[in-house]
Image (cartoon, rainbow, N blue to C red):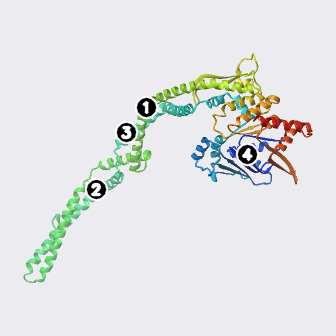
Amino acid sequence: MLSYLSIENIAVIEKVEITFENGFNILTGETGAGKSIIIDSIEAILGERTPKDLIRTGEKSAYIGAQFSSLGNAARSLIEEEGFSLEDDGSILIEREIRLDGRNLCRVGGRPATLSALRRLGPALVTILGQHDSYDLLSRGGHIAYLDAMLSETDRKKIEKYRDAFHSLKEIGREIDMLDSNESEKARRTDMLTFQINELESANITVGEREQLAQRREAAEHARELSETSQAALWAIGKGEGGAAENVANAASQLENASRFFSGFSTVSEKLREAENILLEARDLLSEQQNTFSFDEGEIETIDGRLDTLYRLSVKYGKSEEDMLAFLQKAKDELEAMESSDARREELLKEFEIKRHESISLAKEISEARRIAALRFESRVKEELSFLDMPSARFEVSQKRAALSENGCDEVVFLLSVNPGENMRELSKVASGGELSRIMLAIKTVLSGSEDTGTFIFDEIDTGISGIAAQKVGRKLREISKNVQVLCVTHLPQIAALADHHFLTEKNMSDEKTYTSVRELSFEGRVHELAHMIGGDEITDTMLKNASEMISHSDRAK
């Protein structure tokens, strides 16, 4: 339940602190005194969008803090899932600061939080019902949620299981549609990839090939010149008469013959023999190299053709051989994936059928559970409407088979007949504003035991009713407060008289500024406020006596 609320610098409120109790809490006050601002502040703490112009004039920021205690299981689990911690007493403090620069600072249990986290926590902590929420009944799309609140925990889990299956079904269907819609594009792409793969594979590209070909071409261009040069060198060394090797050998022989007359020639002849050996080695090495300078007129043309092919492919598929081979591998992988898409489609069709049968089976089970719940729901709502001064009202739940959707295979619409003899029609076409308020209250009374929210806030849900109907609405609100904390903003004394705790919102002027205060009333204060609600500014002793009797009578009836 909401046990404490602190508001600073919100509209006409400079600073207000309210301690709420369990049971039936009433907020009253003149129009414009700030009751709606209190509700707006609670909505802000639950993550609702709050405009910065809500900040009090002259201030740079506003603050709202709300302490929740005696939390239900859903709230505890959600707080834990969000990563926040409860206080030792099991309570949690949620804070929000709103700044003029548009920034929001949120904390849960003292830890930073996001607005989206507050929005997720909100429904587990507080349910706010006002005229707007009553008019939600006019939207037939929301009726199924009210009926589902009547289901057992097992059936609610079945709905979650169904939705998982339905989401999978939709996802598989989207993937199949995507494969089907891309069939023509797939055929075009397959032809393109096949051509590219064939072109690259037939080229037999190897890494470093162009560099090797360039070297070979340069050698081929100079092959004749190199061959003639090596031949001339061979002749000069000693492959013909008068060659250097032969001349050196002759000189060495002559000096060897003369060395018997002059020993100094021996040293020279040895040097010449060494030179002869070096020349002969050079001749043999050059002879081997000469064989590599064979010249073929067609080789340059062949090399040029290959280089041209590689250049043309590099323009299309990548500058280097590595780039072209990488392109080839990527094309092969894509083609393989596309060729396997047919197999993937068949696999998806099988999965689709499995999920479709699972979804249909679960939807039918849920539909049957709704049918049974609808009977109890109709009976309970009719009882509540009868109590709320609508004894002739007939209420029915129309449940028709529909195409599979997020909610299963049902279309649920609430039907109503207010007066005897009238046909059942859609609730939105027959209910007035006051009747909508009572219908919403009847529904919430029926569901109050099944909802795990600690606080219900009714914001002027009594609009459009008076007299006995107002008193019965008040009694019903007090009945709900036995299961959950109820906060109610009202203008009717019949409802205010039934409160366990009555808070008065007042607006005062000081130094040309407006200030709103909120205080809990004593018995005497309640009497005076009820008398004011009954008769306005001119309060008589009779009004005070009537107000006192209303409160005393209500206290005895508790």
Decide: marks 4, 2 in contact (CB < 8 A)? Answer: no
Distance in Å between CA atoms under marks 3 and 2: 36 Å
Q: Amino acid at mark 2?
A: Ala
Q: Amino acid at mark 4?
A: Phe
Decide: marks 2, 1 in contact (CB < 8 A)? Answer: no
- Residue pointed to by mark 3: 198
Decide: marks 1, 3 in contact (CB < 8 A)? Answer: no
Which residue is drawn at the image coordinates 10% and 74% (left, top)? 253
Mark seen at residue 20: 4
Identify the secondary structure beneath mark 3. helix
Say whether disc 3 or disc 2 marks the residue closer to the N-terminus. 3
> Where's residue 160, x and y in %?
55, 34
Question: Which of the two residues, 440 or 139, is positioned nearer the viewer here?
Answer: 440
Identify the secondary structure beneath mark 1. helix
Q: Quadrant of residue 32?
A: top right
Say whether disc 4 or disc 3 marks the residue closer to the N-terminus. 4
Distance in Å between CA atoms under marks 4 and 1: 59 Å
Say whether disc 4 or disc 2 marks the residue closer to the N-terminus. 4
> Where's residue 17, x and y in %?
76, 50
Q: Is residue 242 above or below residue 150?
A: below
